[in-house]
Amino acid sequence: MTDLTLTDPRVLRAIELIWKEAEALDDKDYKSWEQMYSDDAHYVVPIDPDTDDFGSSLNLVYDDKRMRRLRVERMLQGYSPSAVAAARTVRVISRFTVRELTDTSVTIRSAQILNAFKRNEFLTLGANLTHTVVFGDEGDDKISLKVIRLVDSEDAVSASGYLL
């Protein structure tokens, strides 16, 4: 990793978008969440924590634009088991490290703790996140890739409904 700085204004814009995404998910504002992604973006939760070949691997979630749209529709219409009595969540995202920075995008790794409360039960999930954010005109930045590497991904299949 090169000596990339968190004080670069582009990096700060990306971190702000990452925090806004977490807030939208916690607020169940799925329409706003969906708009934070570029048309060619992928939202991935791999089972294998070491894979980068998401198209050829088994994933808990591997959503392109169409699948994100369908996921949001299920959440808003209540057709998803995770939408029925949806969990109240609080995401804490920190430990930001810049992996790559260009004039058009930034890739940032971070740590997330998701606390969820549903049906009188608490659940805590830990994950390493990777976001690639593409810079838009006038601050209209978009997420082009989000990878959620759950700490216990091999055992977390039943918990995937809490992620969104």
Image (tube, helix red, strand yellow):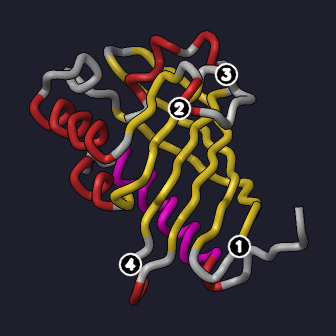
Q: Which residues are magenta?
A: 11-25
* CA distance for labels 2 and 4: 28 Å
Secondary structure of the residue carrying numbered label 4: loop
Classed neighbour count for the residue bearing mark 1: other residues with Cα under 10 Å, few (<14), some (14–19), many (≥20): some
- Does residue 138 appear to the left or right of 126 in the view shown? left
Q: Which residue is mark 4?
A: 140
- The first of marks 3 and 1 along the sequence is 3
Q: Position of residue 77 (x, y in %)?
A: 10, 32
How crowded is the residue under tag 2: few (<14 C-alpha within 10 Å), some, or many (20+)?
few
Residue at 68% in and 77% down: 102
**Badge 4: residue crowd in 10 Å (few <14, some 14–19, many ≥20):** few
The type of residue carrying mark 2 is Gly
Answer yes or no: do the residues labelled 3 and 4 have beta carbons within 8 Å? no
Residue closer to the observer: 96 or 114: 96
Q: CA distance from mark 3 to mark 1?
A: 26 Å
**Circle 1 sits on which residue?**
101
Percent from the top left, x then y, of residue 34?
29, 52
Query: Residue 16 in the image: x percent, y percent?
Result: 52, 69
Residue located at (43% from left, 52% from top):
41
* Disc 3 element: loop
- Which comes sooner in the sequence, label 3 or label 2? 3
Q: Mark 1 and 4 residues: CB-CB less than 8 Å, in contact?
A: no
Residue at which label 2 appears: 55
Quadrant occupied by the N terminus = bottom right
Instruction: Identify the main secondary structure in magenta.
Output: helix
Residue that mark 3 sits on: 48
Q: Quick one: quadrant of the C terminus?
A: top left
The residue closer to the viewer here, 126 or 61, is 61
Q: Earlier in the sequence, mark 2 or mark 4?
A: 2
